[in-house]
Image: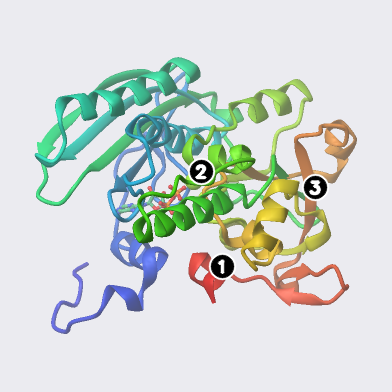
């Protein structure tokens, strides 16, 4: 099947997810060993005993990071962690990464060493091996591409499409912190630009700054669920924002959802900082993104097993597709859940 290339269409008309769907619509899988292609947090390849799980992400200077306030060591760490998060979202164990970088002559050896020190720190922490990559030059800043490879038993892998009516919707940790950390960094950058003599005021904001600059992947949640004998019916990691990820789970599982605003886990510092910025903390939790928490559904019969886990919040339940995707606000009114992204937060 060929694309119709006779007219010009702007990429903005499709958006990121529309573009991926468009580009991948004619892919035909020809190898029996390809268990899962495009469409989940990672691809799944059958290797007999174990299945291999592969995920890749690219970080582009000026789009995904700003080196005026992100130390290179942190950037290296984060670029690895965000990939491992996708492997954990499949309920698999990451084992190897390959790293490709494009660098301009603006960077010194020492700078690239810092980047690698961060990457290797993440490798050590999560027990993965850096096994290869590619290095090339760039005319416009730094580009980092990391591919993570993991493994799991076939029966352990959790996809995005397994949520069933009546399941509970759960999320690990808390939400919106990374976004508020970014707001602090952006504010201090603006102040610094206007008056370079002023020192940045980051006091008391450690937790949310860390959420932005040095996020961790939730390796522990898969282990916790395993120890409680709970296998999620579906799972995804929260990279773009909670509402966007909930909609992915619903679309792929062909189900509806009822999310409860009052159940959203928001750290007090995130809440307070959102208020300081005149932002709605709920909107920050729903649309902020980069939390790298795990969003998953479980059978209602497993509720007793997880109910005492401080790090897991039940935030809603799965309904029939015909009921739609709703958020029940604190006032009791139901609203359609939308993937608003960061722009909505700034309006
Ligand atoms: P995530 O946020 O979990 O990293 P994405 O939203 O980036 O996932 O991607 C969704 C799915 O689309 C994944 O299965 C990914 O591998 C696939 N994908 C993304 N970009 C492309 C592309 N250019 N070509 C083929 N597949 C892609
Ligand atoms: Mg993901």
Q: Is residue 211 visible?
A: yes
Q: Quadrant of residue 149?
A: top left
Asked whether the beta carbons under mark 2 and mark 1 sit within 8 Å of each other, the answer is: no
CA neighbours of label 3 inside 10 A, class few (<14), some (14 to 19), many (20+): many
Q: Quadrant of residue 325?
A: bottom right
**Mark closest to the chain's N terminus, 3 or 1:** 3
- Residue 46 left/right relative to 281: left
Asked whether the beta carbons under mark 3 and mark 2 sit within 8 Å of each other, the answer is: no
- The residue shown at (28%, 39%) is 145
Front residue (pair 225, 206):
206
On screen, residue 260 above or below 83: below
Disc number lying in front (3 or 2)? 2
Ligand 2 within 8 A of label 3's CB?
A: no
Q: Which mark is residue 339?
A: 1
Q: Look at the image and tell me in which quarter the N terminus lies.
A: bottom left
CA neighbours of label 1 inside 10 A, class few (<14), some (14 to 19), many (20+): some
Which residue is label 2 attached to?
Answer: 212
Which residue is label 3 attached to?
Answer: 314
Mark 3 → mark 2, Cα distance in angstroms: 24 Å
x, y percent for residue 163: 68, 51
What secondary structure is found at the residue carrying circle 3? strand
On screen, residue 254 above or below 178: below
- The residue shown at (40%, 24%) is 47
On screen, residue 300 above or below 50: below
Q: Is residue 243 visible?
A: no
């Amino acid at each position: 099947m060929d694309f119709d290339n006779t007219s010009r269409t702007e990429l903005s008309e499709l958006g990121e997810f529309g573009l991926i769907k468009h580009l991948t619509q004619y892919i035909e899988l020809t190898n029996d060993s390809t268990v899962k292609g495009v469409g989940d947090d990672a691809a799944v390849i059958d290797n007999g005993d174990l299945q291999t799980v592969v995920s890749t992400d690219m970080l582009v200077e000026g789009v995904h990071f700003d080196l005026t306030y992100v130390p290179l060591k942190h950037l290296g760490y984060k670029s690895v962690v965000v990939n491992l998060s996708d492997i954990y979202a499949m309920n698999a164990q990451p084992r190897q990464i390959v790293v490709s970088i494009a660098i301009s002559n603006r960077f010194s050896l020492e700078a690239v060493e810092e980047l690698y020190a961060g990457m290797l720190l993440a490798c050590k922490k999560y027990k993965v091996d850096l096994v290869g990559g590619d290095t090339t030059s760039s005319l416009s800043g730094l580009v980092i591409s990391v591919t993570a490879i993991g493994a799991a038993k076939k029966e352990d892998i959790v996809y995005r499409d397994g949520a069933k009516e009546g399941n509970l919707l759960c999320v690990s940790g808390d939400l919106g912190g990374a976004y508020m950390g970014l707001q602090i960094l952006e504010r201090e950058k603006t102040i610094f630009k206007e008056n370079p003599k002023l020192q940045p005021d980051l006091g008391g904001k450690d937790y949310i700054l860390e959420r932005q600059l040095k996020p961790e992947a939730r390796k522990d949640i898969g282990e916790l669920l395993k120890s409680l004998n709970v296998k999620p019916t579906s799972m995804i990691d929260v990279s773009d924002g909670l509402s966007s990820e909930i909609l992915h789970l619903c679309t792929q599982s062909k189900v509806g959802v009822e999310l409860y605003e009052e159940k959203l886990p928001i750290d007090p510092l995130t809440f307070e900082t959102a208020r300081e910025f005149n932002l709605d903390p709920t909107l920050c939790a729903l649309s902020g993104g980069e939390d790298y928490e795990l969003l998953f559904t479980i059978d209602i019969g497993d509720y007793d097993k997880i109910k005492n886990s401080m790090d897991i919040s039940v935030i809603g339940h799965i309904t029939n597709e015909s009921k739609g995707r709703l958020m029940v606000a604190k006032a009791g009114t139901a609203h359609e859940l939308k993937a608003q992204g960061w722009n909505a937060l700034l309006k």
